[in-house]
Amino acid sequence: MGTFHQGKSELHGITVVVETEDGDVYVGRCDDMDEQRIILLDADMHRDGEDGCTTRQYLSRAEQVGVWKKFDRLALPRLPGTKVRRLGELGA
């Protein structure tokens, strides 16, 4: 269950994974989300193979220990093919 701030999405305050159609993966705390954009706070970004790490390995590590933020605030367009899910649901 998310936090209850009026006018915010149900994922407000939850750490989420955003997967774009081009394969980029973002992990951060969801500030807000609507049909047009996703706003993440304290976010990191990963591309498959970056630093010798697959996306699966990156997400597994993020579930265990979190991420090192690269962005204080990041606004991503919510394009077709963009997937948003809770980080904690990946292992389920």
Image (cartoon, rainbow, N blue to C red):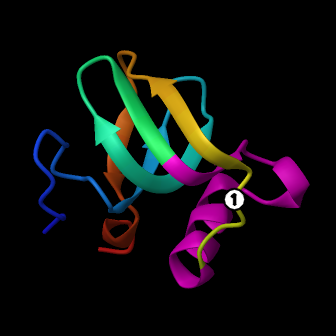
Instruction: Confirm whether the magenta stretch covers residue 62.
Output: yes
Count of number-bearing discs: 1
Q: Quadrant of the N terminus?
A: bottom left
Which residue is labeled 1 in the image? 69
Residue 2 point in image, percent of width and height: 18, 64
Within 10 angstroms of label 1, few (less than 14), some, or many (20 or more) residues?
some
Residue at position x 79%, y 60% in the image: 53
Q: From the viewer's side, name the closer residue of 26 and 11.
A: 11
Residue at position x 29%, y 74% in the image: 92
Residue 12 point in image, percent of width and height: 27, 53
Residue 60 point in image, percent of width and height: 57, 72
User: In the image as oriented, which residue stretches furthest toward the bottom?
Assistant: 64
Residue type, label 1 = Lys
Instruction: Confirm whether the magenta stretch covers residue 60.
Output: yes
Residue at position x 66%, y 63% in the image: 58
Q: From the viewer's side, name the closer residue of 4 and 80.
A: 4
User: In the image as oriented, which residue stretches furthest toward the front?
Assistant: 6
User: Is 70 left or right of 9, judged from the image as shown?
Assistant: right
User: Is 77 left or right of 4, judged from the image as shown?
Assistant: right
Q: In which quarter of the image is residue 59?
A: bottom right
User: Is 83 left or right of 35, judged from the image as shown?
Assistant: right
Q: Give the range drawn in magenta.
A: 41-65
Judging from the image, what secondary structure is the residue with disc 1 in? loop
Where 24 sits versus 37, above or below?
below
Residue 65 point in image, percent of width and height: 61, 82
Where 70 sits versus 21, above or below?
below
